[in-house]
Amino acid sequence: MTLTIASVNVNGIRAACKQRNENNPGMNAWLEETSADIVLMQEVRATPQQAEKALAPALEAGWHLALADAAAKGRAGVGILSRTPLADVEVGFGSFTDAGRWIAATTRDIRVASLYLPSGDTGSPKLDEKYRFLDEFEPMLERWAGEYPDMVIGGDWNICHRREDLKNWKTNTKKSGFLPHERAFMDAVFGTFPD
């Protein structure tokens, strides 16, 4: 079975679905053309009703949608679009059940998840939130690895793993997204040599 999964930070689903001009017909037009079977979305920034309205042409064409919106309106939000029905939808985990940062579902015998990890901000409570997320996320990854031998997690991780992955790594060593603790987390997920 061949399965194509795409992941996209839509930066607001309502804006992403708007037809801007003939060169930018919007996400619904892309969904008509894509070979992807599943689309993992981040930064949806909409309620389920708003997302359904924006994606109405795709949903009418047979796409299935599961969404996790954020309690803080206009922020975060993740979703899954699938050509086949979604089952066992799981929204959030731990203290992040209403943060719009995690959604998982099963389709075609595979578990898929969309992640929007907090970006953090060095020296601020936002970085504390990111570290709290990582602390709660790591044991969940271990649990899911045991429960779902075929699982794909895609999304906006907001962490650059290695200096080879970042053009200006030296200037970013003290910025959120490339801090030692964050990179150590990525080592735990991918190993130190993910090539």
Image (cartoon, grey):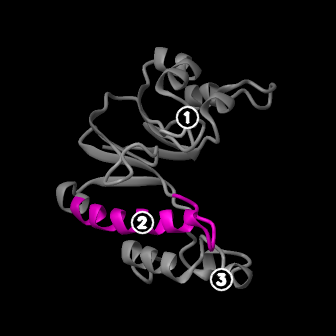
- Looking at the image, is 7 positioned above or below residue 26? below
Q: Which residue is mark 2?
A: 132
The three-letter code of the residue at mark 3 reads Thr
Residue range in magenta is: 118-143
- Looking at the image, is 176 positioned above or below residue 152? below
Q: Which residue is mark 1?
A: 34
Residue 30 rendering spot, x and y as whole percentages? 62, 31
Q: In the image, what residue occupies the spot 57% across and 79% down?
A: 179
Packing grade of label 1 (10 A; few <14, some 14-19, many >=20) is: few
Q: Nearer the viewer, residue 141 or 148?
A: 141
Packing grade of label 2 (10 A; few <14, some 14-19, many >=20) is: some
Q: In the image, what residue occupies the spot 55% across and 18% down?
A: 53
The three-letter code of the residue at mark 1 reads Thr
Element type at marker 2? helix
Q: Which residue is mark 3?
A: 173
Specify the farthest residue to the front: 125
The three-letter code of the residue at mark 2 reads Arg
**Disc 2 and disc 3: Cα gap in Å?**
20 Å
Q: Is residue 168 left or right of residue 74?
A: right
- Looking at the image, is 47 positioned above or below residue 7? above
